[in-house]
Image (spheres, grey):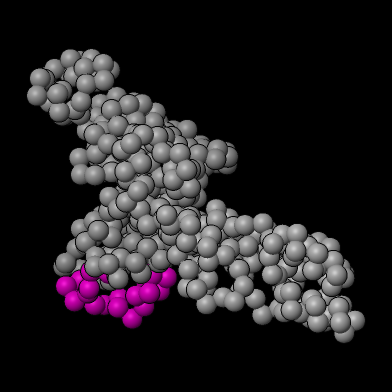
Amino acid sequence: MAENKAAGYKNDYIIQVNHLTKLYGAANRTEASRMMKEGRSKEEVLRETGVTVALWDVSFKVKRGEVFVIIGLSGSGKSTVIRTLNMLNRPTAGQILFEDSAIDTFGKKDLNEYRRDKISMVFQSFGLMSHRDVLGNVVYGLEIKGLARVERERKAMEMLDMVGLKGYEHASIASLSGGMRQRVGIARALANDPEVLLMDEPFSALDPLVRKDMQFELLSLQRKLEKTVVFITHDINEAFKLGDTVAIMRDGRLIQVGTPEEMSASPADDYVREFIDSADKTKVLCARHVMLTPCVVRETDSPDYALREMKNGGVSSAYVVDRHMKFLGIVNVEAAIRARKERKSLKEVYVTDVATTAADTVISDILPVAAEAKYPIAVLENDGSLVGIVSKASVLSSLM
């Protein structure tokens, strides 16, 4: 592992899982494998062989710096997968690569180094030590690494500040709310500065409002620290909100991997389609998925030209841009007619107080703006160029 670090690792994929299988039951594994290859269900395999199939032939890749979410119902194998990534569960077959090193071949020394320096885990049940205060919990991993007390407490305090717990360092764990306990767990995991953060349904025990806050905090931290996160959940809305990439599991098998948008557009089968249908589409679809082509005029165009363009497009307003397609404002029919009568230019009559949004803004964030906006919302790229518009009708049609 030290050689990889010295060489400067360049692969886009930090984790690669190849044909991962996990079977429980000492006897009849050969027969169980034969049945699974034939397409038999895990229930049939258990009934006929006594072997529990936790995972079967699971393969996926995790990009460096992304949030990779694995979703599935109870018994789907999602928690087993995440526990193989740090060898809490050893696979029956298959391979797990971390930066091209096969972790399933690690000896005790390399595995301890890997768990200590490369990967950290946040559990659903928080996993905190009640006999230690908040600071004592966060510094624990740094103690194991052998850092001096001053240095480990400095790092721990930095993490507590980052997760919003500054001032609580000497509070007892019992005195904290569920959300605060989970923040302690995240701070402890981050204190070791791991490259990968494993999160096994970390927010499922929290009430909805706290859960929403923690989701936002996780996204904020991930974007700031650029950690790779493998996140387990049974909630499709949470998966689509957090995940850059989402993997859906069923009965130990991986059914589909893709972005939330890809899955919404092309579900792999009826099972995935049912999962998608249960999602809140306003939190999946973005402005770019529902935007329309606007009537566009340049600021140097004449009022007559603007009126002709609106007539040809069957609309009552046009979106004004400069020669680089940078959005400037809106001119409506009334303003264009007034400009023609008064011999004014479009520059003198278009309005600039117009609602805008980014192309990647989710519909749930656009809805309240669209409800109040006088004109369709202008959709802009990062450089301010106009790429489309979102109307009330286009937002509503996306929800059907």
The residue lying toward the viewer, choosing from 173 and 378, is 378
Against 234, residue 30 (above or below) is above
- Residue 134 relative to residue 213: left or right: left
The location of residue 137, given as percent across then percent down, is 26, 65
The residue lying toward the viewer, choosing from 230 and 155, is 230
Q: Is residue 166 magenta?
A: yes
Q: Residue at x 39, y 31 (%)?
A: 59
- Residue 304 relative to residue 123: left or right: right
The N terminus: image quadrant: top left
Residue 300 occupies which quadrant of the picture? bottom right
In this orientation, does residue 34 appear? Answer: yes
The C terminus: image quadrant: bottom left
In this orientation, does residue 149 appear? Answer: no
The location of residue 240, given as percent across then percent down, is 40, 53
Against 117, residue 137 (above or below) is below
Q: Residue at x 31, y 38 (%)?
A: 271
Against 250, residue 313 (above or below) is below
The location of residue 151, given as percent across then percent down, is 41, 67
The location of residue 285, given as percent across then percent down, is 48, 55
Q: Residue at x 34, y 75 (%)?
A: 165
Q: Residue furthest bottom?
A: 342
The residue lying toward the viewer, choosing from 146 and 159, is 159
Task: Provide the residue span drawn in magenta.
Answer: 159-179
Tally of numbered tags: 0
Q: Residue at x 15, y 23 (%)?
A: 45
- Residue 327 relative to residue 20: left or right: right
Q: Is residue 161 magenta?
A: yes
